[in-house]
Image (cartoon, rainbow, N blue to C red):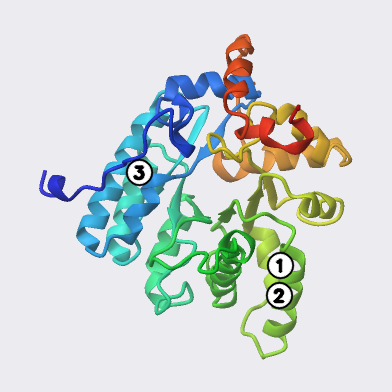
Amino acid sequence: MKFRSRALQVKERPFETNHLLRAGCWDPYERLKDLALDGVSAEVLYPTFAVRAWLIDDHELQEAHLRVYNDWMIDFCSVAPHRYWGLGMVSLWNVEHATEEMRRFIEAGLRGVDIWIAPPERLPYSDERYEPFWAAAEELGATVNMHINGRAESRERDPAGIPIHSINGHKNDAMNSLLHIIASGVLERHPRLNVAVAEAGAGWVPFWLQEADHYTMSRRSTLSMPPSEYFKRQVYCTFISDAVGAYLLQDFGQDNFMWSNDYPHPACTWPDSNILIPEELGGLPAEVQEKVVWRTAARVYNNGEPPAPPDPSEDRTEVENWLEHHRDFGASARPKHRTA
């Protein structure tokens, strides 16, 4: 009640606005139907509009927003905890508060914690102030997640009208934060701590690790292993469609790369993931495909337990009719699937 008059408002209109076109955006029962249509057994749930809370200057107000979001996520996932593997959000301006909030929602059943992919410039993740948070996440078995749209400070994303953020920005954010985490010894001190970067793709990873190994280990690093070894042991990244990453999976990333569908955003592979996955990953051995599509996610978010098989899907007539009116949504928006 204290902050109600200062609460963020979602002005986007349901069923009319980009990221709110499907009721599964906010209704857990409708989402289950869409998961079944896509043949999906379970999914890790990241925030969308809630990332705006991280940009609130009043940190007490920011924390209040995140607690409300986490309560909502707990309730949402309680409808089908075997299908919904939700993440809670924390603000790391106050590490003690963040640790307390993380403990609360992990004990309530959420599967991990979502933090900024771009922390404040003056407080990179190599700063020792974060140490109690890393230790608590390791103790709780809470995977630390960073999504491409989560940052502590606002910035002009595409000042020249060029999609700089989508092409360079979130990869740079991921590289910077992961390098601060790895090179400062966080993963060496906490060998059971898992870190995941969502939606930044995977094709950039091997070259970046090559450079990290070269420049880190040639400068009298105190690490006992090269950065690439910590990555292979404890870091994961997701992709939606990444031809380079899929090619690399023949030799690299088989235990670190995870497929994602990005439902319910327009760029998702829904409702034809079962068609698109074989197109992109079908050249890989079945064992590798299983790791990328579900086994690694189950290991990172579900204690290694495989999810239950997908629910039987309903008739697709309604969805096919819906897609006729939303031809820029999902798999139907991809050129190879678009009809004249």
Which residue in the protein does label 1 denote? Answer: 229
Q: Position of residue 318 (x, y in %)?
A: 58, 13
Figure quadrant of the N terminus: top left
Q: Are marks 2 and 1 in contact (CB under 8 Å)?
A: yes
Q: Position of residue 237 (x, y in %)?
A: 64, 54
- Is 161 displayed left or right of 60 in the figure? right
- Name, please, the residue furthest toward the front: 340
Q: Is residue 322 above or below residue 236?
A: above
Q: Residue at x 81, y 33 (%)?
A: 278
Cα separation between marks 2 and 3: 34 Å
- Name, please, the residue furthest toward the bottom: 219
Name which residue type carries label 1: Glu
Which is nearer the N-term, disc 3 or disc 1?
3
Q: Which mark is residue 105?
A: 3
Figure quadrant of the C terminus: top right
Residue neighbourhood size for the residue with mark 3, other residues' Cα within 10 Å, grouped as few (<14), some (14–19), many (≥20): many
Q: Which mark is residue 226?
A: 2
Task: Classify mark 3: helix, strand or loop.
Answer: helix
Q: Is residue 327 above or below residue 164?
A: above
- Is 128 displayed left or right of 32 in the figure? left
- Is 239 displayed left or right of 286 in the figure? left
Q: Is residue 165 above or below residue 278?
A: below
